[in-house]
Structure formats: C-alpha cells, structure tokens
Image (cartoon, rainbow, N blue to C red):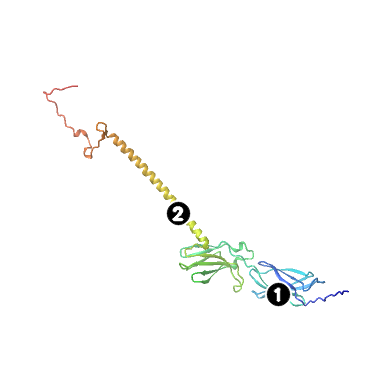
Amino acid sequence: DYVVVKMIPDNRLPPRHLHSVHTGKTFAVIKWESPYDSPDQDMLYAVAVKDLVRKTDKIYKVKTRNSTVEYTIKKLEPGGKYHVIVQLGNMSKESSMKINTVPLSAPDALKIITENDHILLFWKSLALKESNFNESRGYEIHMFDSLMNISAYLGNTTENFFKVSNLKIGHNYSFTVQARCLYSGQMCGEPATLLYDELGTGEDFSATKTGRSTDVAAIVVPVLFLLLVTLGIGFVVLYMRHRRLQNSFTAFANSHYSSRLGSAIFSSGDDLGDEDDEAPMITGFSDDVPMVIA
C-alpha cells in the first residue's frame, strides 16, 4: 500500500542559498535557489540593491521557472559596498547578503625624484589601465613617518606628480598614492606604496641596498680604470725617459773613453773652451837652433 502526497507550495518561504559567485569592479554575479524544488510555474523575484555608501536603492525584477537562478547586477562602482536582498514578488520572507566590489587598481611606476629641499612623487596615469577612472577624480597622497609613528594626509591632485617638502633628516617615510576616496573616504582605490629614507633613494628597502651598490660600482669601476690607465701611461713615460737617459750617458761615456788609460776622461767646466788658449804661443825660431824636418 502506498499513498501519494503533493505538498502545497508555500510562496511565503525565502529564496535559498543566496551567495555571490563573482565580484568585479562594476558588477556582481549572485546565485540562489527557489523556495521549493521544481516550481511548476514562473516565479517573480525582486532583487533590491542598497548602496551603503551613497544611501540609494535600486530594485530589479527576475522572472524564471528554474530551481537555480543566476543573476548579474550591473552598474556598480569600484570599491563600493552594497546590501543585496532577494525575495519573491509577493513580498515573502527575504534572503540577504553584502557584497563589496573590487576597488580601482593602484597607480603603476611610483617613483621619487630628490631635489635640493624637497622631493617629487611621480606615477603613471591610472586611466591607462582603468576605463572606469576619470582623471578629474584625481589622486590622494598619504605619508607615514616610521620614526614618529605618525600618519598624515598630504593632499590630492589631478596631476601625475606631487611635491613633498619639510622632510626631516634621519626619518624614514612611506608614501601612498591612490585614486581619490569618494563619499567621506568610503570608496577608495588601491594604494601604491613606496618607502623612502632621508638619503632620497625613493625605493623599497630591499631594492635600496641593491640600487646603492650598483650606483657605487658604476662610479668606482670607471674611476679605478682611469687610475690604472694613468699609472700605466706614467710608467711607460718614465721607462722611456730612463732608457733615453741611459743611452745618452752611454754614448757620452764612449766618446770620452781613452783606450790608453783604460777609463773615460771628463773635463770640468773650467776646462771647457778653446784648447788653443791654454797652449803656449810659438813666437818664433832662433837662428842657432837647428830645424829638424822628419
């Protein structure tokens, strides 16, 4: 014996298993199941989206007979916060959930250029990779002093650079640049962070050591090379002069060498001059002295 029992659908039950499937910057995909299995007719759902930041509401209607329903909520804002409510159109019990959209990306290529009494922060325009970002929104810059453990809001700009002054010597700072926060700081972009010390390296600590060693090597190696080349040239010049002096002295000594005496004869400065001045003058011959012709 058996009996068939057909349950009366209760349209006052809430949708089941409401959850988020995927969340992007401007959309969210949600999914839920009907209040009961295998609906025998189309069911009308009301999807209410409450913007927790702007304090606005939007209602969408979904009509389907499927037991499992997937729906995409569009026209959301990056970094927004929303409260989603799903219920049958007859205002039955509801299912709800909260979703946060993905914020705008952090600016790329954040760099620091050190000037005499200030530094300049530079970064790439966020509009190059974010179609939802308008340059008129601008960027905001924050600073954290690790020595004083103090955070400070430096300001905002619509440009791709920002000037920072009055930095203290011996302090280490970290700077963050992000898409400007909207609605009392509740809707912000992801921050790009850069560590900076008083020497003005403008890089992460891990990269700073490598950068400094590379810079030092780039300066020291050419200087050492030039010194070695200069010393080499100096040694060659001295060697050539030494050889030239040695050859000159040898030639001079050979020109004054006496084979009879077996040594070189050098005269003093007083002996220099015409040898005829030192020789006795021949005044004449006497008649009584015979002349011998050899």
In the picture, the quarter occupied by the C terminus is top left
Residue 17: quadrant of the picture: bottom right
* In the depicted structure, whether residue 257 falls above or below residue 122: above
Q: Secondary structure at mark 2?
A: helix
Residue in front for this viewpoint, 269 or 180: 269
Q: Position of residue 135 (x, y in %)?
A: 60, 65
Residue in front for this viewpoint, 221 or 162: 221
Kindly report the distance in space between the C-alpha atoms of the residues bearing marks 2 and 1: 66 Å
Residue at x-position 76% and y-position 69%: 68
Q: Position of residue 65 (x, y in %)?
A: 79, 70
Residue 1: quadrant of the picture: bottom right
Say which residue label 2 marks: 220
**In the current view of this chain or complex, which residue is farthest to the front?**
1
Q: Position of residue 265 (x, y in %)?
A: 25, 36
* In the depicted structure, whether residue 34 falls above or below residue 218: below
> In this rendering, would 79 be left or right of 204?
right
Query: Which numbered circle lies on residue 96?
Result: 1
**In the current view of this chain or complex, which residue is farthest to the left?**
288
**In the current view of this chain or complex, which residue is farthest to the right?**
1
Residue in front for this viewpoint, 124 or 263: 263
Pointer 2 or 1: first along the chain: 1
Q: Amino acid at mark 2?
A: Val
Q: Secondary structure at mark 1?
A: strand
Q: Position of residue 66 (x, y in %)?
A: 78, 69
Number of numbered discs present?
2
Residue at x-position 50% and y-position 60%: 209
